[in-house]
């Protein structure tokens, strides 16, 4: 098939048409004429795979990574980072138009477009270790990932050699790595209870690495460093391998600073993760965090106790159930990609608090939820490029409540 790319879809893939039917084709640029094959044919659209670029865009650049367009990670290495930001802003604007917002977006770029990511997941399937090809469970073997921090990248090959050398393909299903500063944790997630000797791998990687093993949701520290330490806004924070933490530190700091500058009065911090944001806020005002994850909740408690934060309360529970019982002037929500539960939207609408701050990594569910948030008026809109070179970005909307401010 041949088509001319007319626009971009929500994940940055090119949009063309064949016989009036929309085709989404990843890794192409607006204006390019391309040859492609259809890999998924639906009634209203199809998904294509690029075969050949017939007319190249002057904006096209050489991708830095040899796995680009294969591993399913990055979406934008065929264009400059500046272009990527413009596309993301346009896509976000299109979403916001659905709720009538036509104002300015405050854009925060990632200071580094490469080597910024502090977390990586490697999947094991058959005798392969790597990333999943876009839209499949098949593994694309990689020996580095250029958007990840260097210690993560350096550990990939030794981990692959360790698993294949010891024939551990049938018991390790996932490897999660996380780096802060010059320390890195590696967590091997097992699908069978098996005793594994990690000593050789640890000696090869060195003292700045730590090794964990997780089976049946129970994590065991095996060798090296136990946790990652980091000072955030003057607070000492510890990170373990499995809890949620934002992946781009520099952009995360900007996000947290904007939140700090926007809160009024007391705060309810919903979907509070490992409590870092609550801890930072508690230095300014009283805050109650609500988090469903057991590990994240424990980490938040540890953070509170280690830093003697008297203004911080951590509640373990489901926001849909806990939020109706709480009172505060500002509500912050930072849900997973699926967005807010309808019940949570209803409770927020009824609460009529002074300010609402909605942080989201999915502009589609954000906009869906905005339609349900009655009484709140959009005050300021942000795009934080937490995930440079990939199709994702972090959004934030600050809402005011005219009745209550
Ligand atoms: C995107 S993360 C937000 C983390 C945090 N705001 C931060 O900046 O580090 C979403 C968090 O919501 C938690 N979560 C998911 N569903 C939840 C629910 N129904 N109630 C409370 N927390 C939930 C997850 O465990 C995860 O830690």
Image (spheres, helix red, strand yellow):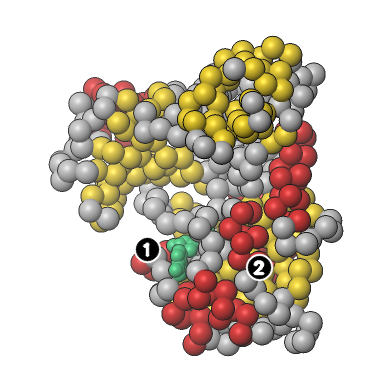
Quadrant containing the C terminus in the rendered view: bottom right
> In whole angstroms, how far apart are the C-alphas of marks 2 and 1?
33 Å
Residue 42's x, y, as percent?
A: 50, 35
144 relative position to 162: left or right: right
Q: Residue furthest right?
A: 103
Q: Is residue 150 visible?
A: no
Q: Is residue 39 visible?
A: yes
- In the drawing, what numbered circle is on residue 371? 2
Which is more N-terminal, label 1 or label 2? 1
Q: Is residue 183 above or below residue 355?
A: above
Which residue is located at x 57 percent, y 74 percent? 345
Which residue is located at x 69 percent, y 12 percent? 54
Residue occupied by mark 1 = 295
Q: Which quadrant would residue 236 be assigned to in this image?
A: bottom right
64 relative position to 209: left or right: right
Residue 253's x, y, as percent?
A: 66, 56
Q: Is residue 359 above or below residue 83?
A: below
Q: Which element is circle 2 on?
A: loop
- Front residue of 78/177: it is 78
Q: Which quadrant would residue 339 be assigned to in this image?
A: bottom right
Residue 49's x, y, as percent?
A: 54, 23
Q: Residues within 10 Å of mark 1 (few under 14, many from 20)?
A: some
Pointer 2 residue Cβ closer than 8 Å to ligand 1: no
52 relative position to 85: left or right: left
217 relative position to 231: left or right: left
- Front residue of 94/295: it is 94
Residue 267's x, y, as percent?
A: 62, 79
Which residue is located at x 63 percent, y 54 percent? 363
């Amino acid at each position: 098939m041949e088509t001319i790319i007319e626009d971009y879809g929500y994940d940055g893939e090119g949009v063309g048409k064949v016989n009036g039917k929309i085709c989404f084709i990843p890794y192409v640029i607006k204006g390019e004429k391309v040859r492609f094959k259809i890999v998924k044919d639906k009634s209203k659209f199809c998904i294509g795979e690029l075969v050949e670029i017939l007319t190249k865009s002057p904006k096209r650049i050489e991708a830095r990574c040899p796995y680009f367009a294969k591993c399913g990670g990055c979406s934008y290495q065929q264009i400059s980072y500046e272009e990527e930001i413009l596309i993301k802003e346009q896509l976000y604007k299109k979403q916001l138009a659905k709720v009538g917002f036509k104002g300015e977006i405050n854009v925060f770029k990632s200071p580094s477009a490469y080597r910024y990511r502090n977390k990586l997941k490697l999947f094991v399937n058959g005798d392969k270790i790597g990333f999943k090809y876009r839209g499949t469970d098949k593994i694309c073997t990689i020996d580095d990932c250029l958007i990840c921090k260097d210690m993560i990248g350096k550990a990939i090959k030794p981990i692959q050699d360790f698993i294949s050398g010891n024939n551990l393909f049938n018991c390790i299903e996932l490897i999660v790595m996380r780096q802060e500063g010059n320390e890195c944790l590696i967590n091997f997630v097992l699908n069978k209870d098996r005793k594994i000797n990690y000593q050789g791998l640890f000696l090869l990687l060195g003292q700045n690495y730590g090794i964990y093993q997780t089976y049946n949701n129970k994590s065991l520290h095996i060798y090296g460093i136990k946790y990652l330490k980091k000072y955030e806004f003057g607070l000492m924070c510890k990170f373990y391998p499995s809890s949620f933490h934002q992946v781009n530190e520099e952009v995360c700091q900007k996000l947290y600073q904007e939140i700090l500058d926007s809160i009024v009065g007391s705060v309810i911090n919903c979907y509070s993760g490992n409590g870092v944001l609550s801890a930072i806020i508690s230095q300014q005002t009283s805050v109650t965090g609500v988090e469903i994850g057991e590990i994240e909740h424990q980490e938040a408690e540890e953070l509170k106790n280690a830093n003697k934060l008297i203004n911080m309360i951590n509640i373990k529970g489901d926001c849909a159930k806990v939020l109706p019982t709480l009172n505060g002037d500002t509500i912050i929500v930072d849900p997973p990609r699926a967005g807010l539960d309808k019940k949570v939207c209803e409770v927020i609408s009824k609460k009529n608090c002074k300010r609402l701050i909605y942080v989201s990594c999915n502009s589609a569910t954000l906009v869906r939820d905005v339609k349900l948030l009655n009484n709140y008026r959009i005050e300021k809109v942000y795009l934080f490029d937490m995930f440079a070179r990939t199709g994702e970005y972090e959004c934030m909307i600050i809402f005011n409540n005219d009745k209550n401010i």
